[in-house]
Image: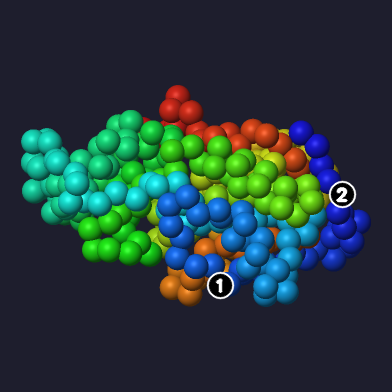
Amino acid sequence: MSKYNNNNNKLNKVPRIEIIGISGIPEIKYKDNLARIIVSKSIEQGTPIEENDIIIITQKIVSKSEGQIKNLINIKPSEYSIKLASKINKDPRLIELIINESKSIIRIDEKRSILITETKQGFICANAGIDNSNIPGSNNVSLLPKDPDKSANNICSDISYLINQTPISVIITDTFGRAWRKGQVNFAIGTSRIEPLLDYMNEKDSQGKILKSTNICIADELASAAELVNFKSNQIPVSIIRNYPYSISSSGAKEIIRAKNEDLFR
């Protein structure tokens, strides 16, 4: 792990970052080259990608480009899916997909038609992250990328190549609910070339006290900040975060996921 020092001195005096939404992204289809589209559109709007920019990309367009779109017409539900669907008032074909994309079911709320699962990628979220928002066709739904960290690495490498090997970082995001607070926020589900956690342990606070357990998930904070310009209804699924000083790492967003034996609520 290493740190880059782009504008660090300036940022320490007057902390400031910039978030730039990339507009004009077309409807993404299977096998579309996301890196080429992102670079092209950033140039078209006069905000070309610069060294050490963090590119924030919503999960939906990554899933579209990777063919992670399923048509419910082609899904045959099992007996179990049919029974569960009748209890929680969901399409049994959707239930079948949710089960197929999950390691386990964590919670079932029949009254509110909520199914919380642990996905194959390790995320705990509603419906295994499957939904139909911003997906053409009434029967089509989007699955999460099979390996979001790998997806982030591929896009990061491709963008860097297209801009003369300029180093940048990538965060892939998705919108999750939170157990103890109302409202959904963007979380990082895949990262490339950025350390997702900022550990302050054993450092001193402003009063000289030693910090014991402060570990900030900057990947999630950056993902949530980008949501302020990535309006879901305005076709802005990509943004640039500029001038944020971060540590470089190959660990990926998998590092964020809390191990089951450390989880107090399972």
Q: Position of residue 7 (x, y in %)?
A: 87, 57
Real-space Cα separation, disc 1 to disc 2, in angstroms:
32 Å
Left or right: 256 with respect to 212? Answer: left
Q: Residue at x 51, y 45 (%)?
A: 189
| Residue 39 shows in the view | yes
Image vertical order of residue 136 relative to residue 216, above or below: below
Residue 48 sits in which quadrant?
bottom right
Judging depth in this view, the residue of 13 and 99 nearest the camera is 99
| Residue corresponding to mark 1 | 24
Judging depth in this view, the residue of 97 and 177 nearest the camera is 97
Q: Position of residue 112 (x, y in %)?
A: 21, 56
User: As drawn, which residue projects farthest toward the right?
Assistant: 9
Q: Residue at x 68, y 51 (%)?
A: 159
**Quarter placement of the C terminus:** top left
Mark identifier at residue 5: 2
- Mark 1 lies on a secondary structure that is loop
Residue 12 sits in which quadrant?
bottom right
Foreground: disc 1 or disc 2: 1
- Mark 2 lies on a secondary structure that is loop
Q: Residue at x 83, y 46 (%)?
A: 4
User: As drawn, which residue projects farthest toward the top?
Assistant: 261
Mark identifier at residue 132: none
| Residue 222 shows in the view | no
Q: Residue at x 34, y 44 (%)?
A: 128
